[in-house]
Structures are given as C-alpha cells and as structure tokens.
Image (cartoon, rainbow, N blue to C red):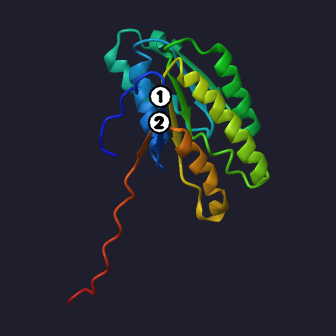
Amino acid sequence: MNAKLMLPLPHQLLAVIGPHAAARLMELAGSLCLRGPLLLLDGGNRANLHPLIRQIRPRTTDPAAALQNITLARAFTCHQVLALVEQARQEAQPGQPVLVLDLLSTFYDESVRLAESARLLRQSLAALSAISRRAPVLISARRPLPAAQNRVMLLELLLDEAAQVWEEAPPPAPAALQPALF
C-alpha cells in the first residue's frame, strides 16, 4: 500500500489492514485536523501525538488550534470500545471524519470469550456503519498474531462490513542465505 491515504466518500466505511495501518491513519489525522473537527478513537493505544505535531507544525501558523480540532478517546477493553463507538454515534457531527485506530486489538484479547468478543464487535461495527451514513469512517486493524489465529473471524467481520479495504503488502521475504565464498 504505497498510495497516499485519502478521505473516502461519505457513506462509506474504509478499513486499512496491516502492521502500519494505524500510523497511516495518524498521518491522515495530521491533514484532517488542519481542515476542521476530527474524532479519533484509539482501540490499541496507537495515537502518538508527537509525530502528528511535527507533521502539522510546518503547515500552519497555529498548531495548537489544529490540535484542538482533534477529539481523542482511548479504550483499553473491547467493552470500552463499544461504549466509545456508541457515544460517537450520538455525538459525531455530520461530515466530521471518524478515525478508529487498531479497532480489533482489544477484541483479540484471549481473556474475553470469543463469542463475547464477536458480539461486541458486531455491535461496534453496527454503530460505526450508522456513523458512516453521516460521515467518513476509517478503521485501522492488524491481523491476529499466530497465537490468536482462532480469532481471525473477527477480522473477517470487519472486512465484511467495510465498503472498501486497503491492505498493506506483506514485507518481502528475506533473501536466501548464500554461502560466503572465500
């Protein structure tokens, strides 16, 4: 995925999948906060504002005003993600972009039964879809780690709900080691 991430059309939910997807959304947040209000929901503790500040500082004479355009909310459990998304459904303004960083992180938590994670994710996706009828919604997610492969169906739920999916290309395989010739 080398293309620059652009704001999707209203009435769409876009999923960006990959290990660096949240960083891509943070880059987009840097551009969007210069234009107006932005809701940033962080489901995986991925919102690092320091690079964002460095990104916007040369592009505006008032970086503090640009940062005030960002409403940031963090969730540390899948139950909190659902609560944040439900709150966003009630409070998001029409046209206000909603970026969700690392949505599936807390849903991959093995301490929550898979059925419960799936139920909460379905409710969260329904709320995000409702928001996407009024404003662009972009979601970043990562594939589950090998130890949590039984939860890949959660990623499939997200992919089924998204109108568009961008997936980062996997890193190139390391070259085979050649014996050194002396």
- Say if 170 sits above or below 141 in the image: below
Amino acid at circle 2: Ala
Residue 78: percent from left, percent from top: 72, 40
In this orientation, which residue lies closer to the viewer: 58 or 145?
145
Residue at (63, 50) in percent of width and height: 154
Residue 98: percent from left, percent from top: 53, 24
| Quadrant housing the C terminus | bottom left
In the rendered image, which quarter is residue 177 located in?
bottom left
Q: Quickly name the residue at label 1.
A: 12
- Say if 123 sits above or below 144 in the image: above
Say few, some or many: other residues with alpha carbon within 10 Å of mark 2 (under 14 / 14 to 19 / 20 or more). some
In the rendered image, which quarter is residue 39 located in?
top right
Say few, some or many: other residues with alpha carbon within 10 Å of mark 1 (under 14 / 14 to 19 / 20 or more). many
Residue at (32, 78) in percent of width and height: 176
Residue 36: percent from left, percent from top: 45, 11
Q: Secondary structure at mark 1?
A: loop
Number of marks: 2
Residue at (39, 26) in percent of width and height: 7
Amino acid at circle 1: Gln
In this orientation, which residue lies closer to the viewer: 95 or 69?
95
Q: Is residue 151 left or right of residue 83?
A: left
Residue farthest toward the bottom in the current orientation of the protein? 182
Q: Is residue 172 left or right of residue 33?
A: left
Q: Quickly name the residue at label 2.
A: 163
Q: Is residue 181 shown to the viewer in this render?
A: yes
Sequence-wise, the earlier of marks 1 and 2 is: 1
- Say if 64 sits above or below 104 in the image: above
